[in-house]
Image (cartoon, rainbow, N blue to C red):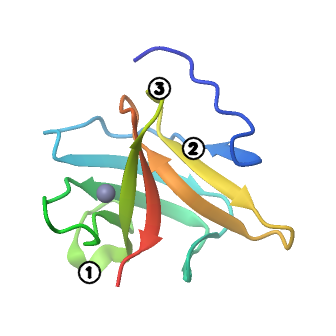
Amino acid sequence: MKRKVILGGIFGLLLLVAFGWNSLADGKQQKADVDLRQPHQVGNVLLEAGKYLIVHEEHVAGQEGQACTFFYHPPRQMEKNAVARFHCRGTEGEPASKFTMRTFRQPDGKVLLRSIQFAGSSEIHALEPAS
Ligand SMILES: [Zn+2]
């Protein structure tokens, strides 16, 4: 868990965001508090700069494609605070010592959010907009 993970240069640009993340509660939900310093785009969804509570719900077998990753206005995780929802494809990677977002900066300056990874987890969640 304590291993230092070096991820530099994977997608050209890598931002590490870690602001007092919450530790994993019951294993079914993973949460992190983030503070985006600039807008991030996931597909056609734009996340404005600001603070978010990110919650990932455990995948339900046979329901791939369902939203599993939710961005809320902090501090409360409530339906009415939901800003955006995504589904993800999980891949195994190196364990992350802190909450990690992998991003890619386009030539026009737009920042694309590719994936998130929670502290202490080796699963990388590649995000896609959920319908
Ligand atoms: Zn997921």
Q: Earlier in the sequence, mark 1 or mark 2?
A: 2
- Looking at the image, in which quadrant does ligand 1 appear? bottom left
Disc on the earlier residue, 1 or 3: 1
Question: Which quadrant: the N terminus?
Answer: top left
Q: Which residue is mark 2?
A: 17
- In the visual, does 79 lie left or right of 43? left
Please, what is the three-letter code of the amino acid marked with disc 3? Ser
Mark number, residue 97? 3
Q: Is residue 10 left or right of residue 92?
A: right
Label 3 to label 2: alpha-carbon separation: 11 Å
Can residue 24 be spotted in the picture?
Answer: yes
Query: What residue sits 86% from the left and 68% below the top?
Result: 107
In this picture, is 42 found above or below 126?
below
Query: Label 1, on which residue?
Result: 80
Question: What residue appears at the point 56 percent right and 58 percent down from the top-left corner?
Answer: 114
Tell me the SS state at disc 1: helix
Confirm or deny contact between disc 1 and disc 2 (CB under 8 A).
no
- Tag 2 or tag 3, which sits nearer the N-term? 2
Horizontally, residue 94 falls left or right of residue 131, namely: right
| Callout 3 crowding tier (Cα within 10 Å): few <14, some 14–19, many ≥20 | some
